[in-house]
Amino acid sequence: MTDAPFRYRRLGYVALNVANLRRSVDFYRDTVGMDMTDFAEGQCAFLRCSDDHHDLVLFPGKEPGMKHLGFEMESDADFDAAATHLRALGVPFTDTPAAEAALLKQRKSLRFKVPGCGVTFELYSGSESAKAPYAPKVANILRLGHCVLKINHFDKSFAWLTENFGFKVSDHIKGDQGEIAFLRCWPSPYHHSLGIARSDRNQFHHVALMVGEIDDIGRGNNRLPRAGSRIVYGPGRHVASGSVFLYFLDPDGMTLEYTYGMEEFAEHDPRQARQLEPTLDVADSWGGIPSPESFAVGVLEGSAPAMTTAQKKESMAARVF
């Protein structure tokens, strides 16, 4: 892994496509516990779990899934350095359309497709905060946590992200039963803001929200089913990251996570990444088993097509994860 000539601030937001915009807004606001910042009828809805203008953007779409991921850079200079670096790597990018950037409250913004998988990343700088501080109501949500994706052509995308674009490996789970790499966007301290799992197709896996108390996990385990959301995995504890988790479904069947207690890394001299076995005990040290409904719904808009039969034989499908 080499250092990129720019610095990230954090995973800024996740953009999702949903089948029914108003239904999903109601769920993410009233059941999950996010605030709605803005709603543009028929276009998109902005929700937050922090003092930022948004942490999640919902778009109406024919197929539920992820539209793109937005990463905030530390400064305008880092944004400019990232754009220069993309040019040097020969990766095409476009400026985010001005009208959309204005809706997103961004000063500088660009988008490109990650080599290999073709997933759309957005880099931006100069975002606005919300007009009032975020006040947790349903759950004590602290921030947007991370997003995990199933990726075909895993090797190419993994190498590009870690060798060329400033992602550091925190833990790598790899073996006959699957593979997933947990990546932090340097120098963000959190164990991972992005996870990629080896698969024979590109697919949304889940998005996570960090909560402030383990009691939020316990309360959610009881509250969410009463509100009509299905619990599909947990409560449990991941060996990678050490976090306590609870996975549940949104109205389209996409998987969400409440997560508590994620490991943090120092910017300088962090611990080395561990190589772990892809077993159920590593996925959950408490011994839980995920429901078949977990991590099953969600396309990645505009990504590369599924592998051919020949390519599948060379790829290890993510059976545990």
Image (cartoon, rainbow, N blue to C red):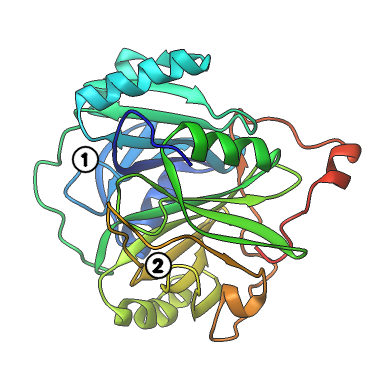
| Residue 157, image quadrant | top right
Residue bearing mark 1: 53
Q: Which residue type carries mark 2?
A: Tyr
Q: Position of residue 311 (x, y in %)?
A: 84, 38
- In this figure, which residue is indicated by the disc labeled 2? 258
Which numbered marker is on residue 278?
none
CA gap, disc 1 and disc 2:
21 Å
Secondary element at tag 2: strand
Q: Nearer the viewer, residue 233 or 200?
A: 200
Q: Where in the figure is residue 40, as x and y percent of width and height?
A: 32, 31
Residue extending furthest left? 132
Seen in the picture, residue 74 relative to 209 is either above or below; the reply is above
Q: Residue at x 50, y 74 (%)?
A: 239
Q: In the structure shown, which secondary structural element does the residue marked by tag 1 occupy?
A: loop
**Given the image, on which type of amino acid does mark 1 rest?**
His
User: For this view, does 63 lie left or right of residue 200?
Assistant: left
Left or right, residue 142 beside residue 32: left
Is 224 rendered above or below residue 254?
below
Q: Are marks 1 and 2 in contact (CB under 8 Å)?
A: no
Between 274 and 294, the one lying in front of the other is 274
Q: Would residue 254 be seen by someone viewing this image from the given angle? A: no
Q: Is residue 139 left or right of residue 315?
A: left
How many numbered marks does the figure carry?
A: 2
Q: Earlier in the sequence, mark 1 or mark 2?
A: 1
| Crowdedness near tag 1: few (<14), some (14–19) or many (≥20) residues, C-alpha within 10 Å | many
For the point 71% across and 60% down, the residue is 178
Residue drawn 9% across the image and 47% down it: 132
Q: Which of 41/44 is in front?
A: 44
Asked where in the image residue 286 lies, by quadrant, the reply is bottom right
| Quarter of the image where the C terminus is located | bottom right
Other residues around mark 2 within 10 Å, as few (<14) / some (14–19) / many (≥20) = many
Kindly identify the residue that appears in the image at 76 percent across and 45 percent down: 200
